[in-house]
Amino acid sequence: MAGARWGAARRREQAARQAEFTAFVETTAPRLRRTAYLMCRDWHLAQDLTQTTLAKMYANWGRIRDTANPEAYSRRVLMNAVFDQNKRRSASEVLLAELPETPHLRPDDTTELHVALLRALAALPIRDQAIVVLRHWEDQSVEAVASTLDVSVSVVKTRNARALTKLRALLGQDFVRI
């Protein structure tokens, strides 16, 4: 009889843990997917990276849910998945001696603006992309970005300044800021 009660209590605890994880996924998954998209510019790959992140978190949810900030943890897991994906992908990329000419566009609508921003973001190294996305898209503090990427605050500040300078140069003087 005691074994049956213990089993029922354990099932209730597992059901509560799964409900808690489901609620976390429902609130966090759209943000994770948008962040992943900004990093890879492919909605299907962004969905895969989001699923990888959530699967890793589910496997350790009992430990993670007791941490101070599961959302910050999810950003870190996502960025690690993006970096791992980038390492795998970069081995199959073809290097060109010269970059193709890209016209400086003056974005007149949101679609052209979106494309121009993503192209410029793609020109940055992957770690700089992560810093710009986390710092400016997700509006994270310098300290939070440093913690997520496991680097010092000064590295975040320096790389962010250099990345923004490069983005300004890539977007040109005619770029319209909305």
Image (cartoon, rainbow, N blue to C red):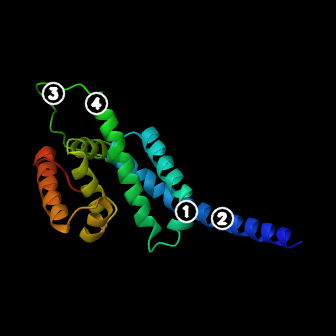
What SS does tag 2 mark? helix
Residue 28 at x, y percent in the picture: 49, 61
Say which residue label 2 marks.
19
Image quadrant holding the N terminus, namely: bottom right
- Which residue is at a point 53% across and 60% down the rendered structure image? 60
Foreground: disc 3 or disc 2:
2
Of circles 2 and 4, which is in front? 4
- For marks 2 and 4, the one nearer the N-term is 2
Left or right of 22 in this view: 49: left
Q: Residue at x 28, y 64 (%)?
A: 145
Relative horizontal placement of residue 125, taking residue 84 as reference (left or right): left
Q: Are marks 1 and 2 in contact (CB under 8 Å)?
A: no
For the residue labelled by badge 3, is the local secondary structure a helix, a strand or a loop? loop
Location of mark 3 (residue): 100
* Above or below, comparing residue 108 to residue 3 in the picture: above
Residue at the image point whose x is 75% and y is 65% from the top? 11
Q: Residues within 10 Å of mark 2 (few under 14, many from 20)?
A: few
Is residue 139 in view?
yes
Q: Label 4, label 1: how many angstroms apart (C-alpha)?
A: 33 Å
Q: Which sits in the foreground, 41 or 89?
A: 89
Which residue position is annotated with label 1? 61
Q: Nearer the viewer, mark 3 or mark 1?
A: 1
Q: Amino acid at mark 3?
A: Pro
The CA distance from mark 3 to mark 2 is 50 Å
- Type of the residue with mark 1: Trp
Cα separation between marks 4 and 3: 21 Å
- The answer to which of 95 and 29 lies nearer the viewer is 95
Find residue 111 and report its horizontal and vertical position in percent: 33, 43
Q: Position of residue 35 (x, y in %)?
A: 38, 53
Residue 41, compared with residue 71, is above or below; it is: above
Give the residue pinned by disc 4: 91
